[in-house]
Image (cartoon, rainbow, N blue to C red):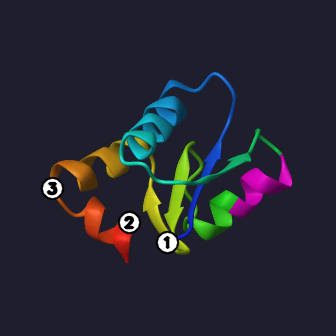
Amino acid sequence: MPKVEIYTIPFCPYCDRAKALLGRKGVAFEEIDAPTGSQARKDAIARSGGRTTVPQIFIDGRAVGGSDELSALDRSGRLDPLLVA
């Protein structure tokens, strides 16, 4: 199972949506609290190539984007192969 990391903030519906999708797939993930101005948020921005929104999701270190991008990967059938690599 690949390492999945998700940078989030509390009360974020997009974060909740991404976590729910991963949960439905039975994927274990590391949730990293990344409030504005925190080192974790700066790390997420740097790792994602400058994206400032949350969530930011990484699969085996690869930036896959946020909730919308994760859902698009799932709809296109490209998410499952990333999760079993």
Q: CA distance from mark 1 to mark 3?
A: 19 Å
Count residues near mark 3 (Cα–Cα under 10 Å), then give few for <14, some for 14-19, many for 20+: few
The residue type indicated by label 1 comes to Pro
Residue that badge 2 annotates: 83
Question: Along the line of sight, which residue is nearer the eye, 37 or 85?
Answer: 85
Residue that badge 3 annotates: 76
| Stretch of the chain drawn in magenta | 38-43
Residue that badge 1 annotates: 2
Estimate the x, y position of residue 81 in percent, counting from the top left: 27, 70
Q: What secondary structure is found at the residue carrying circle 1?
A: loop
Q: CA distance from mark 2 to mark 3?
A: 14 Å
Q: CA distance from mark 1 to mark 2?
A: 6 Å
Q: In this rendering, is residue 81 above or below 35?
A: below
The residue type indicated by label 3 comes to Ser
Say which label, 1 or 3, has the lower sequence index: 1
Q: In this rendering, is residue 82 above or below 7?
A: below
Q: In this rendering, is residue 34 above or below 44?
A: above
Say which label, 1 or 2, has the lower sequence index: 1
Q: Are marks 2 and 3 in contact (CB under 8 Å)?
A: no
Q: In this rendering, is residue 85 above or below 77?
A: below
Estimate the x, y position of residue 11 in percent, counting from the top left: 64, 21
Image side of residue 18 versus residue 5, left or right: left
Estimate the x, y position of residue 4 in percent, counting from the top left: 54, 62
